[in-house]
Amino acid sequence: MAQMMKAAVFVEPGRIEIDERQVPNIGPNDALIRITTTTICGTDVHILKGEYPVEKGLIVGHEPVGVIEKLGSSVTGYREGQRVIAGAICPSFTSYACQDGCSAQDGGHGGHGYKPMGGWRFGNTIDGAQAEYLVVPDAQANLAPVPDGLSDEQVLMCPDIMSTGFAGAEAAGIRIGDSVAVFAQGPIGLCATAGARLRGAGMIIAVDGVDERLTMAKQLGADVTLDFRKVDVVDEILKLTGGRGVDASIEALGLQSTFEAALRVIKPGGTLSSLGVYSEDLHIPLGAFAAGLGDHKIITSLCPGGKERMRRLMQMTDSGRVDLGPMVTHHYALDDIAEAYDLFSHQRDGVLKVAIRPGG
């Protein structure tokens, strides 16, 4: 009789429910991971609401921490029982985009069928991590051993939001002494704030409207916090920079209003680094864009994946240079994931990230 497992399944817009599924088989290049901790991402909420389409019946989630249960015959250098993570983006490193240095865009392996976000497979094109077991494809390229002494919660941010937030800071080209404004201090924005500090920013301005998030932004490296409910953020940022504008802004929400504000505060020659997932068309105001004459750069980033990226992020955690464990504010058993989705999607009780454990 096939072994069964519990999993969070997308049923229809507005419904993600726990279901019984068979523990999946693996191929020669795969690994089966027993999930010990996972979490809910803002993108999962987009899926729940029907704003990002996935197939009905798909197991959702893309942030796995676990233990190797079984290895495919072609996977070497790992052992069963080893603690590992895998990135939310799990590239094969065989696509043109991937071999051209963009591991997040690992779609289209022969010139056909390419689509942006092709490297995002867990909970998008294949079953995801909000389950008792997960198949990691191309395991040789994607399994990253967890250093001894690091807890699940300390590495839980690495697969997605840490990699994404840091990518936003990296793409912004932040130099030592730069001024940086980070719009929205949700989980990804907070990681972008932490990344800006690690990149050597001289002044980091964090923008949000939730007190707990602004407090956490201070802990992670923000020098100034601005509450958009109380001040005109664009005016305040221009005052803080003596009218020069910031060297870089990072947009981490995905709204027209935050994108436009992030564009209005960058200096001539500055960079807008966009991390938001947008659900509607964006419009670029003529003045904010300086009629196309401002030498501005607008760059987007998707979460870099692969075992080397994960190793680097865990190294930063292991060294003590960054600790994102405090971002885990709530804990739920997998059986109670519907309640966790309700809390997270409505942003109640100061929630930042929830730890979901199949074992409770």
Image (tube, grey):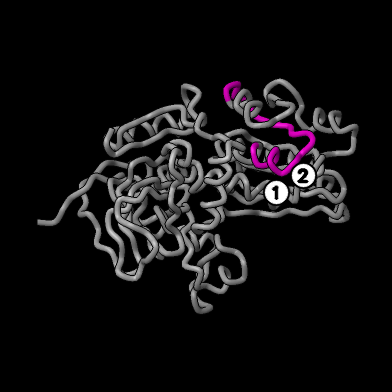
Q: Position of residue 13 (x, y in %)?
A: 37, 45
Q: Residue at x 46, y 45 (%)?
A: 147
For the residue marked with disc 1, what is the amino acid?
A: Ser
**Of callouts 1 and 2, which one flags the residue occurring earlier in the amino acid sequence?**
2
Q: Is residue 310 left or right of residue 209?
A: left
Asked where in the image residue 103 lies, by quadrant, the reply is bottom right
Q: Position of residue 204 (x, y in %)?
A: 74, 34
Residue 11 visible, this orientation: no
Q: Is residue 105 left or right of residue 10?
A: right
What's the mark number on residue 273? 1
Residue in front for this viewpoint, 104 or 288? 104
Image quadrant occupied by the N terminus: bottom left
Q: Residue at x 47, y 44 (%)?
A: 46
Residues at marks 1 and 2 touching, judged by CB atoms closer than 8 Å: yes
Few, some or many C-alpha atoms within 10 Å of disc 1 (few <14, some 14-19, many ≥20)? many
Where is mark 2, residue-wise?
248
Estimate the spatial distance between the alpha carbons at disc 1 and disc 2, rounded to whole Å.
Answer: 7 Å
Q: Position of residue 194 (x, y in %)?
A: 64, 37
Q: Residue at x 52, y 59 (%)?
A: 117
Residue in front for this viewpoint, 356 or 52? 356
